[in-house]
Image: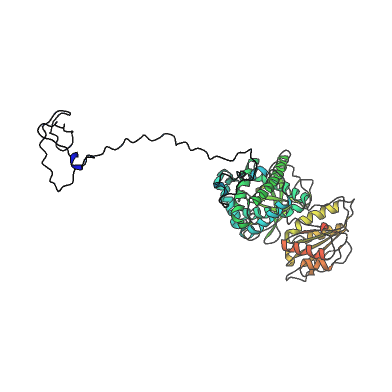
């Protein structure tokens, strides 16, 4: 093997001259490639320097493969040979071992919309009540969020709602609570939802609005139900909403075949009975069907899209006129407008009649009517119907309560009826100051007695028992509830105590 020194490039006399490479040091400027050039003699290498090694030419780089190299599959045990499969190498990650059987595919989560077509189950109702219990303390925020979702996603429906949404938000949650709590009474719940569907026609609600409303409702509940919300709870709400909306839509479509969404009514008489109470007489623009004991909703021209409930204060009349007792309440937009601003010639809008506090004509039981304040209005209508029905021959006893004697504004009219019909007895009850006036009226021929004193529920209970009677209650909600409890304690069955608190 040659030594390093024999690999030195030698040039000189009698040796072949190397051609200069263009671009490298030592090439003559302007020399043509490949032209022979004179090579200057290379000075001798000093003996103490290392020898120069000729550069090694790098091997050619193969082109990048287009396809990855084929990797042979691992050989598996013969399928024909029986025997147990080997245990996985990593029990926590069995997929890393080829010998482990393939895991079954995970089924996709069920779409709540796909199963929402089924009716709600008992489990669904439990979930709905549990989620409502969580949402109820923050109902104001939940309903505000619900309406924000509707108005942002569907701004075209904003015109269907009033400018101020405070009362509307409260009504939404009350409707949800009523629907959830009424599941144990399917017939009553269906009647409530049908009336609600018909009433929504006055707002301009269409069938196509129910779908977006349901989606926004589910989204709002999901946000405020906290840990009570799950896929199962969402499915329960979707099932319930589908049932609720279908009943309301069906009722609205049936009602649209026979009646308008609202009636126009002209005020033909306006009588102030007290500083805050007025009696209005209204002439509807077409036949208006209703029954004594029912109520309707009124809209004034001064507060568009703001509707409030008022009871009919008279039984249906041959002339078709309607009578309402209205008390102006604090921050009551509609009530204050009707008492302090309305006048003959003004035109109101009326929704359809609603409420189930009507007389059962097949039941001839005697009646007990308990009314406080303007709650005497529907009871006055029931008195008229009961007294005009000569076939029933019911006896009627009315307890009419107020704080002061001057607030018993309808007492004179009831006394007049009592004088003409021996089956009617009227007992005024005063809970505040102002006693002393002898405003009682009993059956015809009986001596007039002074007003009873004390709270109305207690006064009714003192005059019991009321066994065999059917009771109708109207007035402030607290008074109605307390009177119902007093009658229950006195032995009157719950099915014979009627009022419309839940419907409103």
Q: How is the image coloured?
A: rainbow
Q: Would you place residue 77 above or below residue 401 in this image? A: above
Q: Position of residue 172 (x, y in %)?
A: 65, 52
Which of these two is toward me, 244 or 54? 54
Q: Position of residue 123 (x, y in %)?
A: 72, 52
Judged from this view, the residue extending furthest toward the front is: 1
Q: Is residue 278 visible?
A: yes
Which of these two is toward me, 124 or 214? 124
Q: How many marks?
A: 0
Q: Quadrant of the C terminus?
A: bottom right
Q: Is residue 380 left or right of residue 21?
A: right
Q: Position of residue 277 (x, y in %)?
A: 69, 59
> Which residue is at 26% across, 39% downward?
56
> Which residue is at 55% across, 39% downward?
75
Q: Position of residue 138 (x, y in %)?
A: 61, 59
Q: Quadrant of the N terminus?
A: top left
Q: Would you place residue 351 above or below residue 494 in this image? A: above
Which of these two is toward me, 40 or 282? 40
Q: Is residue 199 visible?
A: no
């Amino acid at each position: 093997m040659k030594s390093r020194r024999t690999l030195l490039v030698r040039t000189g006399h009698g040796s072949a001259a190397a051609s200069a490479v263009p671009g490298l040091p030592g090439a003559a400027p302007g020399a043509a490639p490949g032209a022979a050039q004179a090579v200057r003699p290379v000075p001798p290498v000093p003996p103490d320097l290392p020898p120069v090694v000729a550069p090694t030419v790098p091997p050619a780089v193969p082109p990048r493969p287009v396809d990855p190299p084929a990797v042979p599959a691992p050989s598996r045990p013969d399928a024909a040979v029986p025997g147990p499969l080997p245990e996985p190498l990593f029990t926590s990650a069995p997929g890393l071992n080829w010998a482990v059987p393939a895991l079954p595919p995970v089924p996709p989560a069920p779409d709540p919309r796909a199963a929402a077509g089924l009716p709600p189950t008992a489990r669904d109702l439990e979930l709905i009540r549990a989620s409502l219990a969580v949402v109820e303390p923050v109902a104001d925020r939940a309903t505000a969020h619900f309406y924000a979702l509707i108005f942002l996603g569907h701004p075209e429906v904003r015109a269907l709602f009033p400018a101020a949404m405070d009362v509307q938000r409260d009504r939404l949650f009350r409707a949800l609570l009523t629907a959830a709590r009424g599941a144990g009474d399917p017939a009553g719940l269906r009647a409530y939802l049908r009336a609600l569907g018909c009433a929504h026609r006055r707002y301009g609600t269409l069938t196509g609005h129910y779908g977006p409303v349901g989606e926004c409702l589910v989204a709002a509940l999901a946000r405020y139900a906290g840990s009570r919300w799950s896929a199962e709870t969402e499915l329960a709400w979707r099932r319930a909403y589908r049932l609720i909306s279908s009943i309301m839509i069906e009722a609205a479509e049936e009602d649209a075949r026979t009646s308008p969404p609202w009636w126009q009514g002209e005020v033909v008489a306006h009588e102030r009975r007290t500083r805050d109470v007025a009696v209005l007489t209204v002439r509807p623009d077409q036949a208006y069907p209703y029954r004594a004991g029912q109520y309707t909703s009124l809209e004034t021209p001064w507060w568009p899209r703001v509707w409030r409930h008022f009871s009919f204060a008279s039984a249906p009349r041959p002339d078709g006129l309607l009578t309402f007792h209205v008390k102006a309440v604090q921050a009551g937009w509609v009530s204050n407008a009707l008492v302090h601003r309305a006048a003959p010639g003004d035109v109101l809008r009326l929704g359809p009649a609603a409420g189930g506090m009507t007389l059962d004509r097949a039941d001839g039981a005697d009646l007990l009517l308990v009314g406080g304040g303007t709650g005497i209005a529907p009871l006055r209508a029931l008195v008229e119907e009961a007294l005009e029905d000569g076939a029933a021959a019911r006896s009627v006893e009315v307890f009419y309560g107020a704080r002061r004697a001057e607030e018993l504004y309808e007492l004179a009219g009831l006394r007049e009826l009592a004088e003409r019909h021996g089956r009617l007895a009227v007992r005024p009850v005063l809970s505040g100051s102002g006693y002393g006036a002898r405003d009682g009226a009993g059956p015809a021929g009986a001596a007039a007695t002074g007003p009873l004193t004390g709270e109305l529920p207690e006064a009714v209970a003192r005059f019991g028992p009321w066994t065999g009677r059917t009771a109708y209650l109207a007035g402030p909600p607290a008074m109605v509830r307390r009177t119902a409890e007093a009658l229950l304690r006195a032995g009157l069955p719950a099915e014979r105590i009627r009022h419309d608190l839940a419907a409103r």
